[in-house]
Image (spheres, rainbow, N blue to C red):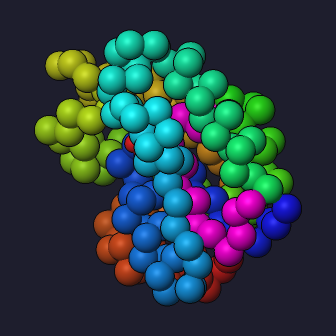
Amino acid sequence: MSSDNIILIGFMGSGKSSVGKLLAEKMGYDFRDTDDMIVADEGMEIQEIFNKYGEELFRNLETTLLLSVMDTLERTVLATGGGMPVRERNLNLLRVMGKIVYLRASQESVESRLFGDNTRPLLMGDDYKDRIKKLLSERTPIYERAADLIIDTDGKSIEDIVNEIMRQA
Ligand code: S3P
């Protein structure tokens, strides 16, 4: 197993995938995204998995995925789904896989980045701002505790964020 990986965690819309792709390119690392891997393995979009089987099953799929890739990932930037570290088991697996970088984003920037988005089952409905608020307050302490490095993303470009990670990681 290699711990020579960078694991990006953070709320939905915090930029894990966009930042991860550019970071991997600049570092000469591979890029993987846990949501994309689950979609490919299951042959179903995330919303479909939530609708058909519910959140709990999705969390099980996240754990199964980590267990199946953790011994093989090397020099990889791994973008994770926003709920991944909420489950203690997943967080413990992520910790041994690499350095955990938390992309922190405020309520306002998450709201504006996800405005009109219809791919996040947990934020569907007119009360999506309240849902963001509730989930953000539940998860922020978890993300902060999990992180080896915290990067504030508000008002910064993808390039700025990538450069900041490369300076500090
Ligand atoms: C989720 C975040 C999503 C995806 C699923 C659940 C969450 O990933 O895994 O919709 O619980 O925060 P992104 O963080 O990439 O949007």
Near-viewer residue (150 or 17) = 17
Q: Position of residue 147 (x, y in %)?
A: 69, 54
The answer to which quarter of the image holds residue 75 is bottom right
Please check the rendered image and state whether residue 101 is part of the magenta-colored stretch, yes or no.
no
Q: Position of residue 167 (x, y in %)?
A: 61, 85
- The N terminus, quarter of image: bottom right
Residue at figure coordinates x 49%, y 77% from the top left: 23
Residue 22 relative to residue 68: left or right: left
Residue 148 relative to residue 31: left or right: right
Q: How many marks?
A: 0
Could you tell me if residue 131 is visible in this image? no
- The C terminus, quarter of image: bottom right
> In this view, which residue lies farthest toward the left?
116
Please check the rendered image and state whether residue 81 is part of the magenta-colored stretch, yes or no.
yes
Residue at figure coordinates x 51%, y 31% from the top left: 137
Give the vertical position of 128 relative to 96 (above or below): above
Give the vertical position of 17 relative to 156 (above or below): above
Assign ligand 1 to one image quadrant.
Answer: top left
Residue at figure coordinates x 53%, y 25% from the top left: 58
Q: Position of residue 45 (x, y in %)?
A: 34, 34
Q: Position of residue 40 (x, y in %)?
A: 44, 43
Give the vertical position of 86 relative to 8 (above or below): above
Residue 135 relative to residue 59: left or right: left
Could you tell me if residue 7 is visible in this image? yes
Near-viewer residue (154 or 103) = 103
Where are the magenta residues, as a range?
72-86
Give the vertical position of 5 relative to 137 (above or below): below
Residue at figure coordinates x 75%, y 31% from the top left: 88
